[in-house]
Amino acid sequence: MEDLSGKGTSVQGGFVKKYLSIIVLSGLLLFQVSASAAGSKIGLGLYLGEPQGGVTLKFGKFPVIGVGWSGLYGNEFRIMVDYWIMNRELQAPIYWYWGVGGKLSLHSDYGFGSFGIGVRVPFGLQWFITDKWELYAETAPGIRIFNPAGFWWDAGLGVRYYF
């Protein structure tokens, strides 16, 4: 990609560094803000998949927040916010859930600095290996309703630690 910054780095490389920094800082900020929520059991974790990686924050049913990075179809910084409608025990310590949510993506593929908005339906399995540690697998089909319109399918594996 052509260097447009005049600093010896490509615009795409600068985009990656900028949004990876935002992911880390957003995760720390989300944790700090939610830590002040009295009486809530707070889970902070990491996930891998599509989006390719990120930070997740959960307390109660709402919100479940994910901040991630995707490079599979281009460079995207993503923020997902979900509400779990159902979270039931299959057989302790394994639970399943489903919900509804929204997704905002900032990407460089359709013009630098453009964004997309969509809805998603997450569902998955949770395995509480201890009272404080959770492993989970999630998939979330969705529809991008803006820029560009279309379908997507998020999926990933993660781990959360509860405070």
Image (spheres, rainbow, N blue to C red):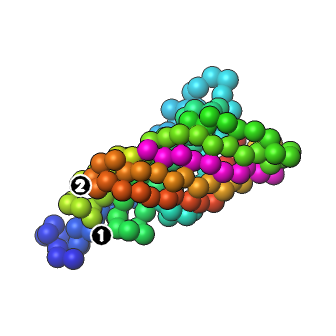
Q: Please provide percent x and percent y for residue 151.
A: 41, 57
Which dot, 1 or 2, sits closer to the camera?
2
Residue drawn at 66 percent across, 28 percent down: 40
Q: What residue type is labelled 2?
A: Gly
Left or right of 103 in this view: 66? right
The span from disc 1 to disc 2 (Cα, nearest Å) is 14 Å
**Closest to the observer: 156 or 27?**
156
**Of helix, strand and loop, which one carries label 1?**
helix
Q: Does the magenta stretch include residue 66?
A: no
Residue 113's disc number? 2
Q: Is residue 104 above or below residue 158?
A: above
Of marks 1 and 2, which one's residue comes earlier in the chain? 1
Residue identifier under label 1: 13
Q: What residue type is labelled 1?
A: Gly
**Closest to the observer: 132 or 58?**
58
Left or right of 43 in this view: 110? left
Residue drawn at 53 percent across, 46 percent down: 121
Residue drawn at 63 percent across, 60 percent down: 157
Residue 27's disc number? none
Q: What is the total number of numbered labels drawn onto the structure image?
A: 2
The span shown in magenta is 119-130
Left or right of 41 in this view: 24? left
Q: Residues within 10 Å of mark 1 (few under 14, many from 20)?
A: few
Magenta span main SS: strand
Q: Residues within 10 Å of mark 2 (few under 14, many from 20)?
A: few
Indicate the quadrant containing the N terminus: top left, top right, bottom left or bottom right.
Answer: bottom left
Residue drawn at 41 percent across, 50 percent down: 143
Q: Please provide percent x and percent y for residue 77.
A: 38, 55
